[in-house]
Image (cartoon, grey):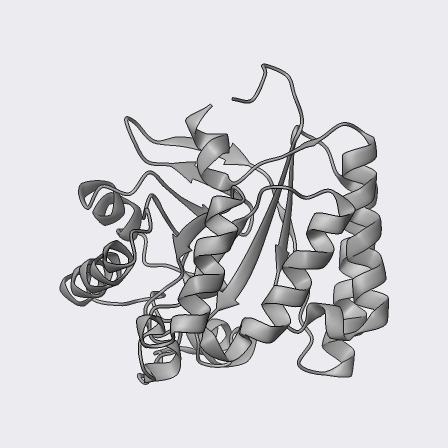
């Protein structure tokens, strides 16, 4: 359990699916060498409408090993993609430019969202994996989704700027996360500048670091991540999963 007043370091690995396993495994190994003993693994049930993760035994075995080491599994969307085009320029920015048509739960009808959540939980349950947390792709979700998640028995969700505990009552913890975009050179440069600025302004007792599989492929980004993580650990921040944090 987290002691009162203790600072927490929450590292989450996003977009985990069989196709990202090799990158994610190297990333997780390096994080452990740095001292991150516990993390949250955000697993996509059926990445981009492909086969479900449970059809890949190597991926499932790797997740099982991480869970035995103390990591938690988190449902991360269902397909992590959207086929519908959003209405309005603002919504198109978030769904087509910001996330490149991956904001699956941004405006998903509640009955469709409910069906996908239940299918995801069935897949996780088939592997013996707990499903206390849900994180929407790009942290973008319909305003009614937290209520649906609570009814479905989820313990928490997150947004880019904080953590929302759902049960036994809603509790918001403001904590912006460090995250990077690597799809283009200008995105990488902007990410480095933004996270440097964020590190200068960082306050509060929760430090969040959200990683994607390709982040360590770019040396300046990997170096910045290492610096942020090690500085947090040097300040005696305790590595925790989201579930352990909201349970404390």
Q: Left of 208 or right of it: where is 140? A: left
Image position, residue 236 (x, y; %): 76, 27
Quadrant in the rendering for residue 29: bottom right
Q: Left of 213 or right of it: where is 57? A: left
Q: Is residue 204 something one can see in this rendering?
A: yes
Residue depicted at x 77% and y 58%: 194
- Number of numbered discs present? 0
Residue depicted at x 59% and y 16%: 3
Image position, residue 57 (x, y; %): 38, 72
Q: Nearer the viewer, residue 122 or 195?
A: 122
Image position, residue 117 (x, y; %): 24, 59
Residue depicted at x 56% and y 58%: 13
Q: Nearer the viewer, residue 85 or 146?
A: 146
Q: Is residue 213 something one can see in this rendering?
A: no
Q: Is residue 73 above or below residue 200?
A: below
Q: Nearer the viewer, residue 75 or 18?
A: 18
Q: Left of 160 or right of it: where is 169? A: left
Q: Is residue 22 above or below residue 7?
A: below
Q: Is residue 82 above or below residue 190?
A: below
Image position, residue 142 (x, y; %): 32, 58
């Amino acid at each position: 359990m987290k002691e009162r007043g203790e600072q927490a370091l929450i590292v989450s690995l996003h977009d985990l699916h069989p196709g990202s396993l090799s990158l994610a495994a190297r990333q997780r190994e390096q994080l452990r060498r740095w001292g991150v003993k516990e993390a949250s693994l955000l697993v996509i049930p059926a990445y981009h409408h492909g086969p479900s993760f449970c059809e890949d035994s190597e991926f499932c075995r790797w997740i099982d090993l991480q869970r035995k080491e103390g990591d938690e599994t988190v449902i991360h969307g269902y397909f992590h993609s959207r086929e519908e085009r959003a209405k309005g320029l603002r919504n198109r920015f978030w769904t087509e430019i910001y996330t490149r048509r991956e904001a699956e739960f941004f405006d998903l009808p509640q009955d469709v969202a409910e069906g996908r959540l239940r299918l995801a939980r069935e897949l996780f349950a088939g592997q013996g994996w707990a499903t206390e947390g849900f994180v929407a792709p790009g942290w973008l979700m319909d305003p009614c989704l937290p209520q649906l998640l609570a009814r479905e028995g989820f313990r928490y969700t997150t947004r880019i700027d904080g953590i929302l505990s759902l049960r036994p009552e809603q509790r918001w913890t403001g904590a912006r996360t460090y995250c990077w975009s690597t799809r283009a050179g200008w995105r990488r440069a902007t990410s480095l500048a933004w996270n440097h600025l964020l590190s200068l302004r960082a306050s509060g007792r929760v430090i969040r670091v959200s990683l994607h599989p390709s982040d360590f492929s770019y040396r300046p980004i990997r170096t910045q991540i290492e610096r942020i993580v090690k500085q947090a650990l040097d300040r005696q921040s305790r590595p925790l999963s989201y579930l352990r944090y909201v349970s404390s």
